[in-house]
Image (cartoon, rainbow, N blue to C red):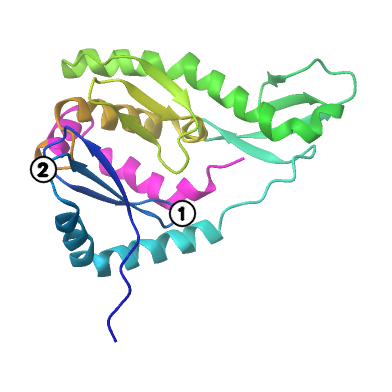
């Protein structure tokens, strides 16, 4: 009996090569040049069937370890790799306020805690990531476009054809060096839109220990949620 085709999503752009990715939810994403026919893409996906199954199985294990937050006082969330305790206080001002390693929220805002914390993480990203982009772009001799911090679903970052960089607000849970790796990774895509050996040489020239940080992201990425 023949195996069923693997479902996938195609993203077209002016890139030169075909890239195949398995997202954290197990979905398969193919990024391809406009000129590559769909039948060719199907053949590439089929040729990578075993690799796709292994990647999906690994994400299934990691996602199973994903914590479930209840958003109560005393619960821990991570910001820049450091644990922060939530504290819901009666009479506290609206929003999220940091006091050392404590994130303070108003007690009656608990039903909105997830929404408020996402907004806080995004604001922290907007306050920190553009400076990291500027620092490494200068070192790498690159000129990026806009820098945005938003919800990218299961992706950590992206680089548009115009060099605009997008980062997932969830990345603010990672240690600062992992965040730097994400910045360097997306900056390198300004020069190479794929994950070729040339791309990784650009990354390594700026961050020789990139593999350690990429490994941390793979191992702990599923935990970086609210």
44 lies above or below 195: below
Is 204 within the magenta? yes
Residue 67 locus on image (x, y percent):
62, 51
Q: Earlier in the sequence, mark 2 or mark 1?
A: 1
- Mark 1: give few (<14), some (14-19) or many (20+) Cα within 10 Å: few
Out of 87 and 192, give the one closest to the viewer. 192
Boundaries of the magenta span:
199-226
Q: Residue at x 18, y 39 (%)?
A: 194
Q: Which residue is mark 1?
A: 25
Horizontal side of residue 96 vs 12, given as left or right: right
Quarter of the picture containing the C terminus is top right
Residue 26 locus on image (x, y percent):
42, 57
- Badge 2 element: helix
Is 135 within the magenta? no
Horizontal side of residue 57 vs 118, given as left or right: left
Residue closest to the far bottom: 1
Q: Residue at x 57, y 26 (%)?
A: 121
Quarter of the picture containing the N terminus is bottom left
Name the dominant secondary structure of the magenta segment: helix
Q: Residue at x 9, y 37 (%)?
A: 198
Indicate which disc residue 37 carries.
none
Residue 127 locus on image (x, y percent):
49, 14
The alpha-carbon separation of the residues under discs 2 and 1 comes to: 27 Å
- Badge 1 element: loop
Residue closest to the far right: 90
- Mark 2: give few (<14), some (14-19) or many (20+) Cα within 10 Å: few
Residue 25 locus on image (x, y percent):
46, 54
Q: Residue at x 22, y 64 (%)?
A: 48
- Residue 91: image quadrant is top right
Indicate which disc residue 197 carries.
2
């Amino acid at each position: 009996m023949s195996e069923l085709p693997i479902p996938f999503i195609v993203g077209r752009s002016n890139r030169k090569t075909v890239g195949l990715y398995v997202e954290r939810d197990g979905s398969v994403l193919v990024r391809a040049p406009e000129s590559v026919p769909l039948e060719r893409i199907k053949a590439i996906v089929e040729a990578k069937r075993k690799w796709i199954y292994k990647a999906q199985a690994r994400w299934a294990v990691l996602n199973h370890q994903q914590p479930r937050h209840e958003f109560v006082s005393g619960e821990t969330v991570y910001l820049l790799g450091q644990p922060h305790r939530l504290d819901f206080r009666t009479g506290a001002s609206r929003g999220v306020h940091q006091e050392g390693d404590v994130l303070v929220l108003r007690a009656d805002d608990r039903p909105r805690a997830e929404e408020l914390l996402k907004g806080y993480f995004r604001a922290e990203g907007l306050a920190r990531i553009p400076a990291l982009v500027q620092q490494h772009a200068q070192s790498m001799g690159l000129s990026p476009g806009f820098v945005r911090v938003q919800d990218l679903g299961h992706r950590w970052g992206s680089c548009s054809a115009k060099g605009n960089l997008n980062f997932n607000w969830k990345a603010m849970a990672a240690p600062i060096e992992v965040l730097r790796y994400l910045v360097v990774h997306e900056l390198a895509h300004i020069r190479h839109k794929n994950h070729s050996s040339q791309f990784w040489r650009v990354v390594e020239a700026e961050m020789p220990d990139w593999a350690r940080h990429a490994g941390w992201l793979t191992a702990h990425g599923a935990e970086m949620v609210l």
